[in-house]
């Protein structure tokens, strides 16, 4: 009997300088792809984070007015661990983000401001693969980000952005989806894995509310298992996988 062939993931493109990562909540990037971000910033690339919400509905025992500022602080600390100093928030409402023109416009505006070649977002599909249902916020922000990559380049879509001085940016070459069940590309996780652990650990309030396990044991176990699952499709190297839509 022959072993079934496992399709190998391609290395992520490297001919770019600026990336913008757009997600719904604090911790989405840390669960999704911080080891890749650490490797990219090591190489001198610029990565900025844009979050649609402050994750204020994320902790059952903490009311949103207190939770939002706390999670914003944790997100900024978390980004700093992987070399990201630009972290912006859009003030959509956690848990009830609506896919629509307002969200597309906000993300298109950010793409025009930051002028990235690579845009990152999180899984926009209904499930994580199999029967694990995704959240409506991730679906809305992921879809709107894929759409906004095109909106950013068209001056006649959202003409008010041009009036605000935001000229079209047609330079987005790829949108890469972290956490996709159908990945196409990957980044070696090894150089950035320790910092990815440190980065996710900065979301301490969230993690302590989520699990009784020791936070570091939980975080290290989660990120290592994810990287090792990808290894069989990336030449045996632990990796962070992305589904890449080229533009
Ligand atoms: Zn999330």
Image (cartoon, rainbow, N blue to C red):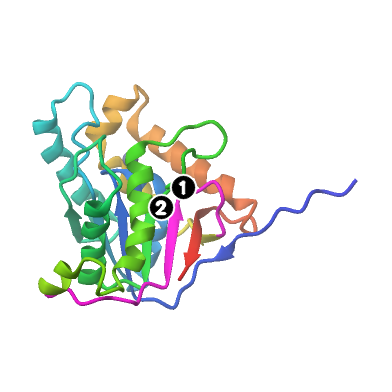
Q: Quadrant of ligand 1?
A: top left
Task: Identify the mark at residue 33; answer none if there is no mark.
Answer: 2
Residue 58 appears in the figure: yes
Dot 2: within a 10 Å radius of its alpha carbon, few (fewer than 14), some, or many (20 or more) residues? many
Q: Quadrant of residue 223?
A: top left
- Which one is closest to the eye, mark 1 or mark 2? 1
Q: Position of residue 186 (x, y in %)?
A: 52, 60
Q: Position of residue 190 (x, y in %)?
A: 48, 56
Query: Which quadrant is the C terminus positioned in?
Result: bottom left
84 left or right, relative to 228: left
Q: Position of residue 112 (x, y in %)?
A: 23, 71
Query: Which quadrant is the N terminus positioned in?
Result: top right
Closest to the observer, 201 or 18: 18
Instruction: Please give the range of residues in magenta.
Output: 165-184
Secondary structure under tag 1 reads: loop
What residue lies at 19% left-to-right and 51% top-to-bottom? 76
Secondary structure under tag 2 reads: loop
Q: Which residue is mark 1?
A: 179
Closest to the observer, 48 or 42: 48
Closest to the observer, 57 or 39: 57
What residue lies at 25% left-to-right and 72% top-to-bottom? 156
Residue 198 appears in the figure: no
Closest to the observer, 73 or 164: 164
Q: Are marks 1 and 2 in contact (CB under 8 Å)?
A: yes
What residue lies at 9% left-to-right and 32% top-to-bottom? 65
Check if residue 176 falls in the magenta segment.
Answer: yes
221 left or right, relative to 71: right
Check if residue 167 falls in the magenta segment.
Answer: yes
Q: Quadrant of residue 74?
A: top left
Q: Quadrant of residue 175?
A: bottom left
The image shows residue 187, relative to residue 167, as above or below, that is: above
Magenta-colored segment: predominant secondary structure: loop
């Amino acid at each position: 009997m022959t072993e079934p062939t496992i399709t190998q993931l391609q290395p992520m493109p490297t001919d770019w300088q600026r990336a913008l990562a757009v997600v719904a909540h604090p911790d989405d990037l840390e669960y999704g792809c911080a080891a890749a971000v650490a490797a990219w910033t090591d190489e001198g690339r610029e990565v900025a984070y844009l979050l649609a919400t402050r994750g204020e509905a994320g902790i059952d025992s903490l009311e949103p007015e207190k939770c939002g500022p706390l999670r914003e602080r944790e997100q900024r600390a978390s980004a700093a661990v992987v070399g990201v100093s630009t972290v912006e928030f859009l003030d959509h409402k956690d848990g009830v983000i609506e896919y629509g023109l307002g969200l597309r416009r906000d993300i298109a505006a950010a793409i025009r401001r930051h002028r990235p070649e690579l845009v990152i977002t999180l899984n926009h599909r209904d499930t994580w693969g199999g029967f694990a249902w995704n959240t409506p916020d991730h679906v809305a922000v992921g879809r709107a980000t894929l759409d906004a990559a095109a909106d950013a380049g068209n001056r006649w879509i959202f003409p008010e952005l041009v009036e605000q001085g935001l000229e079209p940016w047609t330079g987005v070459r790829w949108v890469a989806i972290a956490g996709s069940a159908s990945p196409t590309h990957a980044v070696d996780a090894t150089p950035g894995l320790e910092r990815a652990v440190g980065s996710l650990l900065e979301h301490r309030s969230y993690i302590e509310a989520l699990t009784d396990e020791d936070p570091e044991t939980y975080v290290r176990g989660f990120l290592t298992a994810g990287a090792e699952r990808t290894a069989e499709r990336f030449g045996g190297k632990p990796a962070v996988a992305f589904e890449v839509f080229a533009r």
